Image: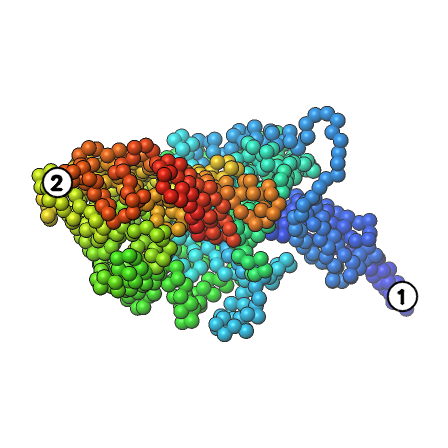
Amino acid sequence: MRYLLCIILFALVFTGNKVQAQKIIITGAILEAHSEETIPFANVVIKGKPIAVTADEMGVYRFVLSASQISKGDSLIASAIGFKKTAHVVNSADTVVNVNFRLTREDYTLNEVVILAGENPADRIVRKIIKNKDTHNINESDNYTYQVYNKMELDAADFNADMFEKNKLLRPFDFILNNIDSTSEARPFLPMFLTETLSKYYYQRAPPTTKEIIEASRVSGVENESVTQFLGSMYNKADVYENFIAIVGKNIPSPIGNQAFVYYKFYLLDSATVDNHWCYKLKFKPRLPQENAFAGDFWVADTTFAIKRISMELNGAKSNINFVERMTIFQEFINPKNQWWALAKSKLIIDFMVQKKGSRIIGRKTTSYSNFLFDQANTEKVLKNKEDIELADDVLKKDEQFWTTVRPDTLSKNERAIYAMMDTLKEMPLAKTYLQVINTIVTGYYVKGKVEIGPYFSLLSSNQVQGWRASFGMRSSNAFSTKVMPTVYMAYGFKDKSIKGGADVLWLLSKKPRQAIHAFYKNDLDIASTSAEDFGQDNILAGLYRRNVPQKLTNFETVSVGYERDWKLGWSNKLYVSRKSINPLFNYYYFNSNNPDPKTTLNTTEVQLNTRFAYKEKFLSGEFERISTGSDYPIINLTYTAGIKGVFKSNVAYHRLEMSVYDWFYVGSLGYTSYYLRAGKVWGNVPFLLLENYPGNETFFFNTYSFNRLNEYEFTSDTYANLFVTHHFEGLFFNKIPLLRKLKLREVISGKLGVGSLSAQNKARSTDPTGTYHQFDDLLTDWEIQTPTLKKPYIEAGAGIENILRIFRVDAVWRLTYNDRPQRVEVKVGVQLLF
C-alpha cells in the first residue's frame, strides 16, 4: 500500500506540473496581400491584452503563451506602417496554432515633426542611394552569367461561378471550377494560363553585349516557339535603378531614380539587420496623389546604400492607366560577389479589370535569378553570335521530371492542373467552336477545313466608280500546307458592272531565318498615291465615311514576283520585279516630247529592292503571317526602284530612291513622342503618278501617316521630304484637374511638314503645249485644283484629346500654310485601344 501510494502521489505531482507547464504556440507569416511576399518586422498583438511580438526579417512571428494568456475566440491584430491593420480570430484550442496575415496597403500620414536643423534623414539616404548606384551595379563588372527561372500566370478573380450553371453556353465547361484556388484568404481565383521558362543570361560590359539562351519553355495550351522569346527575363523586366520603369506602355518614375524627389516624399521608419546587413527602412509615396507613381517601402544596406528589398504598389483607380486596377512590384537583391549587388527575385502582379463591377484578370510574373558566375572565359565566345535571344532546339520538349528538378518552388495543385485543363479544352468540340469564332473576329477569316474564307470586313464596300461592291475571297489554311499559301478574291461593282480580283501565292522557304517567295496578280481599284489610309478601299468604312470630294481612284493591273529574307541583327531584304498597267479613273493624260498625243494609260516595269533595319525587333509568328512587336530602336527603310523602259511594253524609265525612319521615345514624365520621316528623289522624265504625291486624307478619321488636311494629289514633287511628329502627354495637365482626372482624359498634339520641288521637265510632262496643267482637268471644283508643286513648305498642326471612354480620340487639325482653302480647321475622329 505504501508503494502504491507513493506511485499515486508521484503521478499526481508529475501530471500537475505538466498541466501547469503546458504552453500554447501561435506562429505564422505576415504577407503583403497583393504580392504574397512577407513583411519584415511587422507587429502582432493580442487584442485587449498587453502582449505583442515583432516578426523577424523573414516576416515570421511566434507567440509562446500560457493557457491563461490566450483562449479560443481571442483576436490577433497585425500591423505595419503603410498597411491596414488586419485581425484574425483564434478558432482553435490546439497547443500549436498557425495564423497567417495578409495586409493591404493604405494611404498613410505621419504625425507632424519639427526638424530644427539639417536635411530630412530619409532624403539624405535617398541621395546616397542615387550617388552610389554605379558603385555596386553588377553591370559594372567585366562579364557575368546567371540562370533565370520565369513563371507567368493568368488567373480569373471575382467572377460569378453560378454563370457556368445558368448559362447553357458555359455549362459544358463547369469542370474548370474544380481548379479554383480557395487557399487565398483575400479572394478565391481560377488559374487560367501558365508559362514556365528556364534560361541562361550572359552579359559583357565592353563592348556592351547581352544574350539570353532559352533552354526550356512550357506554355499551357500553346506550342509556338515565337511566343517563347517573349517569356524570358529580357521582357517586362522592371529595373528600379533606372530613372523610369516602363510597364504596360507607361513610363513610371522610379523611387530611386535621379529625379526621385520630384515625384516622391520619403520617410525613415526603422533600422535592423536584414540578411547580415545593417539596413534602413524607408517609406515613400507620390507627392501628388493623381500622378502615375508608386507607394511602398524599401530596405537599403548601410555603407553601400544598395537596395536589399523593395515593395511598391500603384493604385490604378488614382492613376491614368486603363484596365489596371492595381500593380505591385516586389524585388529582392543579394550580394553575390565583392561589391556587386544583383537581383535575386522579382515579382510583378497586375490586376486587370475591363469593367468596374466585373470580374478581373490577375497577371503574375515571378522571376528567380541564381548560379551567378563572374569573369567566365567562355562568355565572349557565347556572345559572338549577336542574336540577343536564342532558343534551344528542344526548348519545348522538356518533361515533367526536368521541370520538377529546376523549379525554385514547387507548383501548387491548382497550377499543375492548368496544363491538364488546357489539354482538355483543346480537345472539346464546343471549345474549338468558340475559338473559331474568336479567331474569325480577330483575323477576319473563317477557317473551314483546308480553306479560310474572308476577310469579312471586305465583303461589302462602296466607292464612286463601282457604287456598292460585293467581294468574296479565300485562302488555304494550315491544314492544307504550312509551306505554301495560295489566296484568291473576286469583287463585283453594281454601278459599273465590272469584275475585279486577284490571286497570290506565298511560298515559305524557311522560318529561321525567314525566307519566302511571293507572286501575285491583281486587277483592282486603289488610290495611286503613297497614302496609308487606316482602311483600304475595299473596306466598308472607306466609302461611307469620306468627305464630299471626288474619290481619285486608279485601276491597277499588276503582276509581281518577289523574294524576301531576314538576316541577323534586324536586317532584312525584299527584291521584287513588277509589271504595272496604271489607268486613272479621272481626267488624266500626260505628254511626251517625242509624241504630242496625250496618253491615258501608264505602263511600267519595275525592279525594287528594299533594305530594312530594325535592331532587336521581335515578331509574334504564325505559320505564314507575323506581327511585329516593335523595336526599342529606330526602324529604317531604304528602297530603290528602277523603272525599265521597253520591257513588257513599259513606256517610262526612271530611278527612285527613298528612305524612311520611324521611332518613338519617352520624354521623362512628360509622355512620349513618335516621329516618322520619309524623304526621297525621283530621277527621270515621268508623269506625276510616279512622283511623290503627298498623302492626303479624305475621310473623317484621323490618320497618323497622312496629311489630314490635304486632299489627294494636291501637290507633286520629285524631290521631297515629309516629317510627322506626335506627342502624347498622357494626362500631364488633365490629371491635375479633379473632374477631368476621373475621366482619365489625355492630351495629344501633332505637327506635319511637307517640303519638295518639281523639276522643269517633269512639270512639262503633265502640261500641254498651251501651258495648261492637266493634273485634274475639269473633274474637280476650282478650289481643289492646286499648283503642281510646293512653292513653300506645307504645314499642318493638330491638338486633341484621347482616351475618351478609353477608346476614342478627337483632334482638331489646322492648315498653317496654303490656308486659302475652305474649312481651314477640321475635326477628325480616331479609335485606339491603349493602357
Judging depth in this view, the residue of 206 and 621 nearest the camera is: 621
**In the image, residue 60 lies at what x, y percent?**
67, 49
Residue at 53% over, 71% down: 164
Residue 356, above or below 650: below
* Disc 2: which residue: 592
In this view, 57 is above or below 195: above
The x and y percentages for residue 233 are 46, 45
Residue 826: tell me if it is visible: yes
Q: Residues within 10 Å of mark 1 (few under 14, many from 20)?
A: few
Question: What is the x, y in percent for residue 801?
Answer: 49, 46
Q: Quadrant of residue 696?
A: top left
For the question of whether residue 239 can be seen, the reply is no
Q: Residue at x 18, y 37 (%)?
A: 771
Q: Considering the image in quadrants, where does the N terminus appear? A: bottom right
- Residue 513: percent from the left, percent from the top? 28, 47
Q: Which residue is mark 1?
A: 5
| Total residue callouts | 2
Of the pair 817 and 747, the residue shown nearer to us: 817
- Mark 2 Cα within 10 Å, few/some/many (few <14, many 20+)? some
The numbered mark at residue 292 is: none
Q: Amino acid at mark 1?
A: Leu
